[in-house]
Amino acid sequence: MHVQIVNFKLNEMTRAEYDALLDEVGPQFPQIDGLKTKYYLADDKKNTYGGVYIWETEQAMLDYKAGEIYQSILDHPGLDEITTIDFDVIDGHSFFDK
């Protein structure tokens, strides 16, 4: 498995507008090949938002990053200071929901 963490700030967008955007785009994510889970993140006090993506493989994440959905995040005028980091999962020492 592979983990990707994306963070950004809202740019001239309210939290309510952001939540409406999530309602609009959220249904796309379960359809993405290789994406096992996505968690949305929010810290309203620091104006920091994002997502944690759990991928089947690093290649699945790279394919996503090369695609239209990820590019639409990068290009969205309401999202600013976008960062992404990713990690391999250490299988022998990780645990999962039971």
Image (spheres, rainbow, N blue to C red):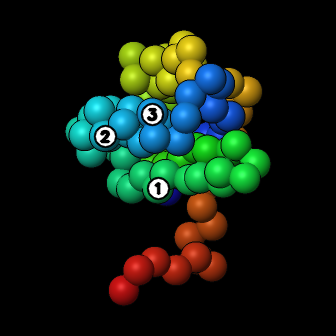
Q: Secondary structure at mark 1?
A: strand
Q: Residue at x 68, y 34 (%)?
A: 9
x and y percentages locating residue 58 in the rendered image: 52, 42
> Residue 97's image quarter?
bottom left
Question: Which mark is nearer the camera, 3 or 1?
Answer: 3
Tell me the amino acid under the disc marked 2: Asp
For the question of whether residue 66 can be seen, the reply is no
Question: Which mark is nearer the camera, 2 or 3?
Answer: 3
Tell me the amino acid under the disc marked 1: Tyr
For the question of whether residue 8 can be seen, the reply is yes
Mark toward the start of the polypeptide (2 vs 3): 3
Mark toward the start of the polypeptide (1 vs 2): 2
Q: Residue at x 72, y 53 (%)?
A: 45
> Residue 69 vs residue 92: left or right?
left
Q: In whole angstroms, how far apart are the C-alphas of marks 2 and 3?
A: 10 Å
Q: In whole angstroms, how far apart are the C-alphas of marks 1 and 2?
A: 14 Å
Q: Is residue 40 above or below residue 32?
A: below
| Residue on which the image places disc 2 | 23
Q: Residue 39, which numbered label?
A: 1
Which residue extends farthest bottom? 98
From the viewer's side, name the closer residue of 28 and 66. 28
> Residue 26 vs residue 31: left or right?
right
User: Quick one: label 2, few (<14), some, or many (20+) residues within 10 Å?
Assistant: few
x and y percentages locating residue 39 in the rendered image: 46, 56
Q: Secondary structure at mark 2?
A: helix
Tell me the amino acid under the disc marked 3: Glu
Mark toward the start of the polypeptide (3 vs 1): 3
User: Quick one: label 3, few (<14), some, or many (20+) residues within 10 Å?
Assistant: few
From the viewer's side, name the closer residue of 1 and 22. 22
